[in-house]
Each structure stands twice: as structure tokens, then as C-alpha cells.
Image: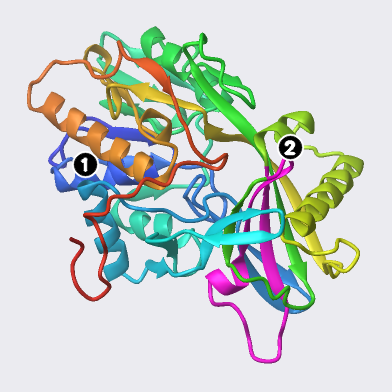
Amino acid sequence: MAANAHGPSVAIVGGGIAGLVCAARLGQLGITAATVFDTGSHAPGGRCSTRKIDVAGKTFLFDHSAQYFTVSDNRFAKIVSFLHSKGAVKVWKGPVGVLKGGRFEKKSNLQAFVGTEGMKSVPECLATLSKVDRPVWIGNVVWEPMAKKWKVGKYGYFDYLVIAHNGKCADRLMGNAGAPKIHELLRVRFTPKLIQKVQQMQLCSLWVLLAVFPTSLKLPFEGAFVEDSDVTWVANNTAKLGQRATGDGRECWTIFSSRQFGAAHKVPQENIPPGKADEVTKRLLAAFAKSAGLDSRALPSPTYTKVQLWGAAVPLNVLDGADCVFQASQNVGICGDWLVSPCIEGAAVSGLALAESIHRHVRGERRDTGLGCTFKPVHGPAMGSFPTNSKLVFNPGGKSG
């Protein structure tokens, strides 16, 4: 794919928020020959995804990764305004707060956003702005120095390469690609607690339990950060996504484990032993009941449960000093939430920054970005960050301001 009337060709490996925003911004800048390659069989989105599950003749929606997002950056505020105008997001009024020992405390002045049909609505809307090829597994990329192009699997040659995902797959992909400085930044370590002296990306692992209860639990919240050794977050998908139907009292809940629990019970996520799945389910249900002030014996038995191990869950550190990484001599860059802040806003800001770096390179600038940066710790909840800005309040039907 050589450069043409649509500008240089760009291969973006990873169809999460960072990759999709990068592609959309490139298009705005006149670089329209960009292709996003994503492994998703049902939809793009990465961590911003929703499961559809049929239980006794009814389809339920579960947000099983990203739960909601906030806005603190003007650039991201414009993206959220666009998503709202397309009917892809809505303000989540909650209540959302903190749960400890059976007592719930609502977070004041929190403006939270969710996808209208689950968090998948966000990437589905963004994907309409660019070319997305899925389900596609890119297992090999190589820099060809004579041609100054990237060979991307069986998909041919591209002028630029964007790595918009992380974890072991990104590490392996770039291991022999011919860009050692980029590969060095993609090396990853899995740990429940940040190791300060280790200057490389560090990710935690979390268990996620999806549960359908036969009746409403009648709890005074829709989402809560939990102060408990086993559970860190619980959310009522039925209320959050407006799924309650007349005469149907069933409720769908998502329950996140703590980092420590995730590490203590880690198994191969592609092949979870049935015994471990049962153990994790019982432990998380018991911790949920205890934290919510419910007697575990009185907690109604779920009519459906499913656990998943989110192996490369959330970054424990981020790059200090740059929103993206770009190596000018080899036309390659990285974008993702782990470079800015582990949240949807962080991913979007990183995608914007890399698109603009590529645009400047096309126009003749030869400057690296982020290659000399170190990592700094992330402080916040186990499932990510939720930055806010009191000066940015979104008014549905009006403007953010």
C-alpha cells in the first residue's frame, strides 16, 4: 500500500479507543489511507466492550471491562460531545460511590458517562469514522529499511505502523520487528503491586464475575468502589443501562476482584479450570454480599454466572512526559491509555497525540517523541483512573463548558 492521493498508508494494530481515535484524527488531518486491524470477532473496542448474554429467553447486557468514564481534558470533551450527538453515550446519574462494611457513601459532583447500549457503543460509533478490518490477528511486522516501509503480515506494505495495544501480544509482535527502542517500551511485567525500581510497563490481573439474580437486590446504588480485600468494584448493569422490563425483576451485576485476589488466583485465562471458576465465583459473591451489608445466606442464588480472568487488565504505571511514542527514523509509534492515564480519556488523548505526530512527520518534521521518557506510578482504583475537571461540565442538549 504505497502513498497515494489519500496520503501515506498507516497500519494501526489494535482497535481499542486509542487506535480508533488515532485513525479518526488522521482522517481529519487528510491521511485517509489508514487501516485499523482488530482481533474482535463481535466488535472493536478493546477494554471498552459489552457482552450480550441470553438467559431464559432474555438478552442481558454486561459491561465487563471498562465501566464508565469521566472527562477532564478539553480535547476529549470534544470527542464526548460528538459521541453524545450520535446517541452513543449518555450521562450516568447513578448513584455511584464508595461501599465499605455495608455502608454506601455517594460521590458528590461526579459526572460519569456510559455507552447507551453498553460501553461497546463508544468504539462502535468511533469505528464508523475509519476503515476497520476484523477479526484479524497480526502476528508479524517487519521494518524494511531500504524501502522505508512496514511489512504487516499478509496485508502488505505500509508507510507507517501504529501499535495501539499492549501486554504480551504487543511485546511479542515487536520482538523481532527491527525497532528495538519501540520494543523496549512494550516489554511488560504482571504484578498486583507496582515495583518502583522496575522501569517497564506493569499490568495487574483482575477477575470479573457476571451474575444474574432472579430478583432485585434493592441496593441504594448502581455502582460502587468497594473497600474489601477480595472485591474492588460492583455495578448494577440493569439499572445503569436501563434494561429493567415490566414484570421482570432480574438484575445483572458485574463484580471486579481486587489486584491481590487476581494475582492469588491467577490461572491461564484461555483455559480456566472449572474448579477454579467455581471457587472464584463463590468467593466474589460472598465478598459482594458482605460489603453490601447482605447476609450471604440470604443473597438469592444467581440464575447465571460467568467468570473471566482479565489477564492484562490495568496499567500500574504510565509514561512520564509524553502522550504517545513516535520514532521518526522508522515511521513507527505507540498509543494507549498506559502512556497517559489508565482510562478511556487517556486512550483517546494518546491516539490524538500520535496522529498529530504522524501528520507532522508527513509534513517534514523529524523528531522523536517519548523514547527517552521513564515511567511513573498510577494512583487510584484497581480498575483504572477517573480524572475530573470542575470547569468541564457537560450539558446534554447544550455545550460542554
Q: Is residue 4 above or below residue 198?
A: below
Q: Is residue 213 magenta?
A: no
Viewer can see residue 32? no
Q: Position of residue 297 (x, y in %)?
A: 91, 64
Q: Which residues are magenta?
A: 228-257
Viewer can see residue 154? yes
**Numbered badge on residue 279:** none
Mark 2 residue element:
loop
Pick the front one: 151 or 192: 192
Earlier in the chain: of badge 2 and badge 1, it is 1
Q: Is residue 333 left or right of residue 67?
A: left
- Look at 48% across and 15% down and name the residue there: 200
Q: Quadrant of residue 156?
A: top left
Question: Which residue corresponds to mark 1?
Answer: 26
- Look at 37% across and 23% down and name the residue there: 319
User: Label 1 is placed on what type of residue?
Assistant: Leu
Q: Is residue 252 magenta?
A: yes
What whole-number distance in Å separates the C-alpha atoms at marks 2 and 1?
35 Å
Pick the front one: 210 or 286: 286
* Colouring convention used in this rendered image of the protein: rainbow
- Look at 42% across and 16% down and name the residue there: 185
Q: Quadrant of residue 151?
A: top left
Q: Quadrant of residue 323?
A: top left
Q: Is residue 20 left or right of residue 227?
A: left
Q: Is residue 161 left or right of residue 173?
A: left
Q: How many marks?
A: 2
Pick the front one: 137 or 58: 58
